[in-house]
Image (cartoon, grey):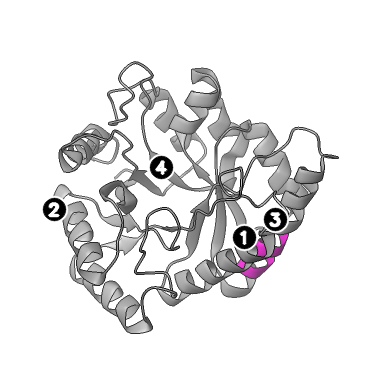
Amino acid sequence: MSSFSIGCALWTLGATPDVRTLARQMEIAADIGCTSVQPWIVNVEYRPCILDPEVGSAADRREIVKIAESLGLTFSAFCAQLQGATTYGGLEEEEGLGWRIDKTKEALDTTAELGGDIITTHAGLLPEDRSDTAYQTLLRSVSEIAEHSAKVGVYFALETGQESPQALSDFIDEIGNPWLCVNYDPCNLLRFGTEAGTVQGVHILGDKIIHTHAKDWNPETMQATCGEGLVPWDAYIGALGDIGYKGVLAIEDETGNEDMVGSIGRSYQFLRPWVDD
C-alpha cells in the first residue's frame, strides 16, 4: 500500500461563508474520492470564513467536525494565509505585525479546537541577506509563532515559495523549533525556479516536509490541473518516497476553470496511480 493519500485544498472551490457551504465543499471532495480536506481558517482573502472565530461560533465549528466525520474525511491541515501591506504573508513587515502574529496564534488555537495538527501559510518574503531588517523581523515573528505552536501542539508549516529550498531549510534550522515545518508546493518552486530544483528541494528539506500541495504549472495555458503542466511528477513523487514522506497530496487547483469540480476530479484521477496498491 502506498504511503500517500489524496486530499483537497477547499479554497479551490471558493470562500466558506457558512456551515452549509463548507459542508457542500467537503461533500464534493469526498465524492471525488479524497480522504482529507484542508479548509481556509482565517477571515482574509477567501472571506467570509466560517471557521474564523470572528465569523463563526464554537457550535459552527463543532458541526463542521461532525460533518467531516460523517463523510469519512479528516483535516489534513488548515490554511492561515495572511497578507501584509506589500507581501503575501507579511510576517517580515513591521506595520500591522502584532495583529498578524496574534491572528496566526488564534488560527493555531482554532486548529487545535477542531482536532487538527497543522496550519500552512506563506510567511512572507525571505531576504537572502540575514542582516536585512526584514529577515530579522521574519525570524522574530516566526519564532514567536512556533513557540505558540509547541504550546498548543499544532505544527506551523511554511509553504515553499520564492525562496530556494536551501534558504528555507536554513531559516528553519536557525529557529530550531521542531514544531516549525514545511508545506511543499512543487508548482511554486517550478514557477520561481527550475524543474531540477523542484525535485532536489524535496531532498534538501527532507523530514521538515509535513504536508504537500498537489498543483501544476503551465505558463502557456496558465492552468494547473495536475498532469497538464510542467511539474515532473514521477521524479517529484519518487523523491517524496525517497525521504519517507507518508502524508497527503492535497489538490490545490488554481486553473480558474469554469468546471472547477471537473478539474479537481482530473487531478485526482491523475494522482491515483501513486496511491493505489
Q: Earlier in the sequence, mark 2 or mark 1?
A: 2
Q: Nearer the viewer, mark 3 or mark 4?
A: 3
Q: Residue reaching furthest right? A: 131
Main SS type for the magenta part?
helix
Q: Position of residue 137 (x, y in %)?
A: 76, 51
Q: Residue reaching furthest bottom? A: 59
The quarter of the rendered structure image containing the N terminus is: top left
Q: Position of residue 39 (x, y in %)?
A: 36, 58
Under circle 2, the secondary element is helix
Q: Residue at x 56, y 26 (%)?
A: 200
Q: What residue is pinned by disc 3?
A: 95
Q: Specify whether 44 is left or right of 102.
A: left
Q: Which mark is residue 213?
A: 4
Instruction: Name the residue nearer the viewer: 73 or 89.
Output: 89
Q: CA distance from mark 3 to mark 1?
A: 26 Å
Q: Is residue 73 magenta?
A: no
Residue 28 in view of the camera: yes
Q: Residue at x 58, y 32 (%)?
A: 162
Q: Residue at x 26, y 78 (%)?
A: 63
Q: Earlier in the sequence, mark 3 or mark 4?
A: 3
Q: Amino acid at mark 4?
A: His
Q: CA distance from mark 3 to mark 2?
A: 43 Å
Q: Earlier in the sequence, mark 4 or mark 2?
A: 2
Q: What residue is pinned by disc 2?
A: 31
Q: Residues within 10 Å of mark 4 (few under 14, many from 20)?
A: many
Q: What residue is pinned by disc 1?
A: 179
User: In the image, is residue 151 above or below residue 273?
Assistant: below
Q: Position of residue 70 (x, y in %)?
A: 19, 71
Q: Earlier in the sequence, mark 1 or mark 4?
A: 1
